[in-house]
Image (spheres, rainbow, N blue to C red):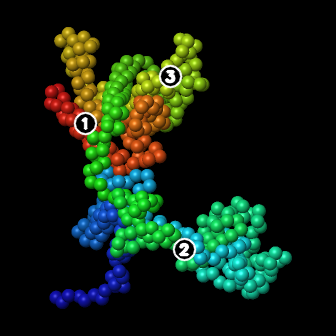
Amino acid sequence: MTAIQTRPSLSDLRPNGRHLFVVAFDAAMLWLIWQLVQDGSYPLAAILVVPVVMITISFSVARLYAYRWLSIGLCLTVLFVLYPVLYTFYLSTTSTAQGHILTQQQAVAALERTLYVPEDGQSYSWAAYQGEDGSYALWLTDDQGATFVARIGADTSAGVPGEAGIGAADESGLPTTLDGARRLERRELFGLLDTLSAMTFGTPPSEIKITSLSSAATTQPRYAYDAAQDTVTDRQTGLTFRPENGTFVAETGEELRPGFFTDVGTRNFSRFLSSAALRGPLLSIILWNFTYAILSVLLSFALGLFIAVLFDNLPGKKIIRMLLIIPYPIPALVSILIWRNLLNPDFGALVKLQEALFGSAPGWLTDPTATRIAIIVINVWLSYPYFYIVSSGALQAIPSEMLDAAAVDGANVWQKFSRITLPLLLLIVGPLLVASFAFTFNNFNLIFVFNQGNPPIAGSPIPAGHTDILISFVYRLGFNTSQADYGLAAAISIVLFVFVALITFFQFRYTRILEDRV
C-alpha cells in the first residue's frame, strides 16, 4: 500500500504558541537581567537566571512539558523563599549601612546628577508658565535684556513676545501665554518654588535651574567620574576623590555622599561575635529570648491541655469551646493593642483596678520584670486556644481501651494521665510544639507592637531594650537607628537562622527518641 501524502495544514505552519511565549519571556527577562547588571545588582541578576532556565526548558522540551506549571511554582519558591535567604547572606558580607546602600555604579550616577552654578554661568530673571497637562516652561531674561524660552528636556531658544506660540506682552513686558500655557502669578510661585527648583530646564551641558524666587542660572554637572582611574573630580573645587571603604574621599579628608557598599568578607560576623559593645546587652537578650519562648510555649500548651481535659465531658461543651477560642480568631495586632491599653499606666482599666484593690500597680510598660511578665501573659492568651484545639483533637485519638486497662490494674487518675495520656499526646503534638517554639522565638510582632522592646537597657552602648528578643534587636540595629547597619543586622540574622535551625533539629531528634520509647 502506498502512503497517503497529506499537505500540512495552515495551523501546522504557524509558530507554536508556547514557543512564542518562551521567546517573549526570555527576551524580557534577559533585558531585565542586563539592566540589573548595569546597576551592579549582581545577586538579583544571578538568581533571575534560574527562572529563565527553568521556564525555557519546561516549555520548550516536549518530554518536560507536563512539568511547566510545576516549574513556575518552583521559580516563585526560588524568588520569594530561597533568594531572600541567599541575599541576606550576601548582605552580611558587605558594608551596607546608612549612607552606603547603593552599588558603586548607582552612587556614581547619583553624583553625576548633582549640578552647580559655575562662576561664568549666565543668570536670568524668570517667569513660569503651566500648561493644561501640568507641564512647565520658563520665560528667561538675561542681564542684556535678551529673552529666551526654556523647557524641560528641550534646547533653550530665543523668544520674542508676539511670535508664533508666544502671547503678546502685557504691561510688565512678559508674554501672557506661552504655547497655550498660562503664566503663573507670583502668589502661586510661593507654593510651587520647591517643585520648580527641583526641575532642570534645557539640555546639557548648559542646563538651567531656578535658584531663587527671582533668579535662575545655567548649571553644569558638578562631579565627573573617570572610570580608568576610578576617581571622581569636583569641577567646582578641583578636588579628586578616590574610593575608600565605600566612600569617595579626597586627600583633605572630605567625603562625598552617597557612599556605596563593598565586600568585607566575614568582618560583620567577627564584629557580632567579638564586639564588647554587642556582648553587653546581647547576653541579656539571648537569655530573655529563650525564657520568653520556652515559658510561652509550655504555659500555652499546659493551659490548653488543662482546659481540654477539664471541659471534655461537661454539658454545653460546644458553647464552652466557642467561648474559649475567642482570642484565636481576633487578629493578634488588635489583641496586643487592647492589652497595651488595658495596662497603660495613665488610663489602663486593669491598672486602675489594681490601684483600687491593692493601692498600686506594677509598671507594666516601664518596669523590666513587669513588662516581661506582661508579654508572656499576652502570648499565652494569644496561643492557648490553638493548643486547646490541638489537644482536644489529640485526646480523641488516644485509645480508651488503654485507659480502661490501666484502671483495671489499679492506676489512679494522675498515673493514667502521666504514664499514658501525656506520652501519647506528646507523640501527636510534639512537632507542633517544636514549630511553636521556633515561631515564638522569632515573634517580632508581639515585642514590637506591645512596647517596642522597651524599657531601654540603661548604659547600653547600642540601642537595646529589656524586652528585646534577637529579631527585634536586629530590627533596631538595621532599621530603627540613625546609624543603621544593614550588613551587621544581616550577619546577626544568619546566625539567628542557624541557631534556630539547630535547636529545631535537636528538638525533632528528641521527639523521635520519644517515639521509640513509647
Nearest to the observer: residue 116 or residue 402? 116
Q: Secondary structure at mark 2?
A: strand
Position of residue 136 in the picture relative to residue 98 (left or right) = right
Residue at 54%, 69% in the rendered image: 115
Three-letter code, disc 1: Ile
Dividing the picture into quarters, in which one does residue 359 lie? top right
Q: In the image, which disc is placed on residue 220? A: 2
Mark 1 or mark 2: name the one nearer the start of the chain: 2
- Amino acid tagged 3: Gly
The residue beneath circle 3 is 363
Residue at image position (83%, 77%) is 170
Q: Residue furthest front?
A: 252
Q: Earlier in the sequence, mark 3 or mark 2?
A: 2
Residue in the foreground of this view, choosing between 163 and 84: 163
Q: Amino acid at mark 2?
A: Gln
Of the image marks 1 and 3, the number of the one nearer the N terminus: 3
Q: Residue at x 19, y 29 (%)?
A: 514
Question: Residue 195: image x %, image y %?
Answer: 64, 63
Give the alpha-carbon distance from disc 1 to disc 3, as whole Å: 34 Å
Residue matched to label 1: 503
Q: Nearer the viewer, mark 3 or mark 2?
A: 2
The C terminus lies in which quarter of the figure? top left
Measured in 3D between alpha carbons, the distance from the residue under mark 1 to the one under mark 2, in whole angstroms, is 59 Å
Residue 329 drawn at (x, y percent): 47, 35
Left or right: where 190 falls relative to 35:
right
Vertical side of 123 occupied by 380: above or below = above
- Name which quarter of the figure residue 471 lies in: top left
Which structural element holds mark 3?
loop
Q: Residue at x 60, y 65 (%)?
A: 198
Q: Nearer the viewer, residue 461 or 59?
A: 461
